[in-house]
């Protein structure tokens, strides 16, 4: 078992005197759990139907029905909407499949995905197309971070030129561009934060309901409206540069990490600070989270990875095989994760073991540093990128004891960030002339600061953008 440390959490004085708040889910989500896998929450159906169906207020006032009748009506509307879903239409073309079973299986998949337990196998089915979409003329300097919306419609990028750009994935065009300094100066007039201390944007995170975009702006965290790219709120508290941000899936709980060796937890429903997590002995280089209330961090040169369990106020420590800087971590599911180091190694871990299950050394060739990782949660597919411009697609075998190389995509430049579309339709990659956090290598003048959308074909259903 991995080593457990208790009482390593440091909270503010006021938070110690108050009862620990339970972070709420999205306002449109139900707080109670369903009783079985075959049941779907009627409150969730209600929200789904109200979002998709225009409401006539006069007609609603005249319509009188009991709560039970309303549940039945909403359930019928929800099933009718499922029948028009593209994926369900494709499956119904097969006469051997019973229509009622298709709907039942689809409802079960929705429930499992909501809980973070729906596993998909993609690695053996993927292939790429030649019509790569390249989104350019957005940044003059190297791209440092990107964030993809949950539905795959928009991608946000940030760079060393202190601009945030919003792109449309389907059209491949720039939709919005803002100068963070200008927006920050306009928003900060009533506060005491020193603007001169703030530098490039090193991290981006987007909530799964597309309500909040968070950016790490040196010592501060800026919360934006993704539609208009206007600042909603500013958090301060870190003592050094913010290096990573991640939202908990289906929640408005934000985790941030910094060079000050601290992880901070923020509640965006109430726009307040929750607590700080202490334990790393060096700058924290990466952070990730999933559905449950915990986050995964890498401690850079301290050679450790920590899994922070927020409710239990404890953390598990995982030790690297040899001394190296752990630069990237990604959670595959609640029980497994992957890490990458500056020595070119990629490791697969179980949360129940303090040593990796398997490690691939020199994954991108001898001496090539792993600069980014991306994975589809609860699947067997992930990708790694290096400063030689190589993106490798990997398969995780069912036993979690082997990692297999499946496909390679080559481009000129540093791969500073990647994200998969949740339906495995494409991979978004930020390609730049320099590393996102520094200038340890000579600037690659042959490369361009662009965003690549790499379409992915699934061999059985040919899903792509």
Image: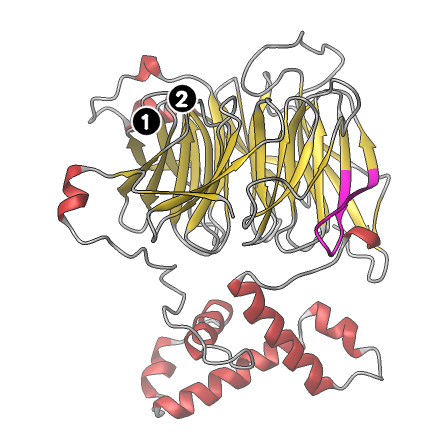
Is label 2 in a helix, a strand or a loop?
loop
Residue 100's place in the image compared with 153, above or below, is below
Residue 253's place in the image compared with 133, above or below, is below
- Disc 2 to disc 1: CB gap under 8 Å: yes
Q: Does the magenta stretch include residue 201?
A: no
Residue 256 image offset from top left, x and y in percent: 40, 35
Residue denoted by label 2: 241
Let me know if residue 317 appears in the view. Answer: yes
Q: Which region of the structure is painted magenta?
A: 393-407
Label 1, residues with CA under 10 Å away: few <14, some 14-19, many ≥20: many
The picture quadrant where one finds residue 121 is bottom right
Residue denoted by label 1: 238
Let me know if residue 172 appears in the view. Answer: no
Label 2, residues with CA under 10 Å away: few <14, some 14-19, many ≥20: many
Q: Which residue lies furthest to the top in this view?
A: 442
What distance separates the C-alpha of mark 2 from that of mark 1?
Answer: 7 Å
């Amino acid at each position: 078992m991995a080593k457990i440390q208790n009482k390593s959490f440091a909270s503010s004085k006021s938070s110690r005197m108050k009862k620990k708040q339970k972070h709420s889910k999205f306002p449109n989500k139900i707080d109670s759990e369903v009783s079985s896998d075959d049941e779907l929450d009627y409150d969730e159906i209600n929200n789904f139907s109200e979002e998709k169906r225009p409401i006539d207020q006069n007609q609603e006032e005249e319509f009188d029905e009991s709560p039970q009748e309303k549940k039945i009506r909403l359930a019928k509307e929800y099933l009718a909407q499922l029948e028009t879903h593209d994926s369900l239409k494709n499956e119904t073309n097969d006469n051997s499949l019973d229509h009622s079973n298709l709907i039942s299986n689809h409802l079960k998949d929705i429930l499992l995905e909501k809980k973070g337990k729906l596993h998909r196998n993609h690695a053996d089915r993927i292939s790429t197309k030649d019509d790569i979409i390249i989104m350019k003329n957005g940044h003059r300097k190297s791209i440092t971070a990107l964030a993809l919306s949950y539905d795959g419609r928009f991608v946000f990028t940030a760079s060393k030129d202190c601009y945030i750009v919003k792109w449309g994935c389907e059209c491949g065009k720039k939709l919005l561009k803002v100068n963070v300094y200008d927006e920050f100066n306009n928003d900060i007039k009533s506060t005491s934060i020193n603007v001169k201390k703030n530098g490039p944007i090193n991290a981006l995170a987007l909530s799964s309901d597309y309500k909040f975009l968070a950016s790490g702006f040196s010592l501060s965290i800026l919360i934006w409206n993704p539609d208009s790219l206007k600042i909603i709120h500013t958090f301060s508290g870190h003592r050094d540069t913010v290096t990573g941000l991640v939202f908990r899936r289906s929640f408005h709980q934000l985790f941030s990490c910094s060079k000050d060796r601290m992880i901070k937890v923020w509640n965006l429903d109430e726009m307040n600070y929750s607590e700080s997590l202490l334990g790393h002995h060096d700058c924290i280089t990466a952070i990730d989270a999933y559905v449950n209330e915990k986050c995964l961090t890498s401690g850079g040169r301290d050679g450790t990875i920590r899994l922070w369990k927020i409710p239990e106020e404890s953390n598990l420590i995982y030790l690297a095989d040899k001394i190296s800087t752990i630069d990237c971590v990604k959670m595959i599911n609640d029980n497994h994760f992957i890490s990458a180091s500056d020595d070119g190694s990629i490791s697969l871990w179980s949360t129940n073991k303090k040593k990796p299950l398997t490690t691939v050394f020199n994954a991108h060739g001898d001496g090539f540093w792993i600069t980014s990782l991306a994975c589809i949660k609860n699947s067997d597919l992930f990708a790694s990128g290096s400063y030689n411009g190589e993106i490798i697609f990997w398969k995780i075998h069912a036993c979690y004891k082997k990692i297999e190389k499946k496909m390679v995509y080559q481009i000129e430049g540093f791969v500073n960030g990647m994200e998969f579309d949740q339906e495995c339709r494409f991979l978004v990659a930020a390609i730049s002339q320099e590393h996102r956090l520094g200038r340890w290598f000579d600037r690659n003048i042959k490369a361009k600061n662009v965003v690549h959308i790499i379409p992915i074909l699934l061999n059985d259903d040919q899903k792509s953008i």
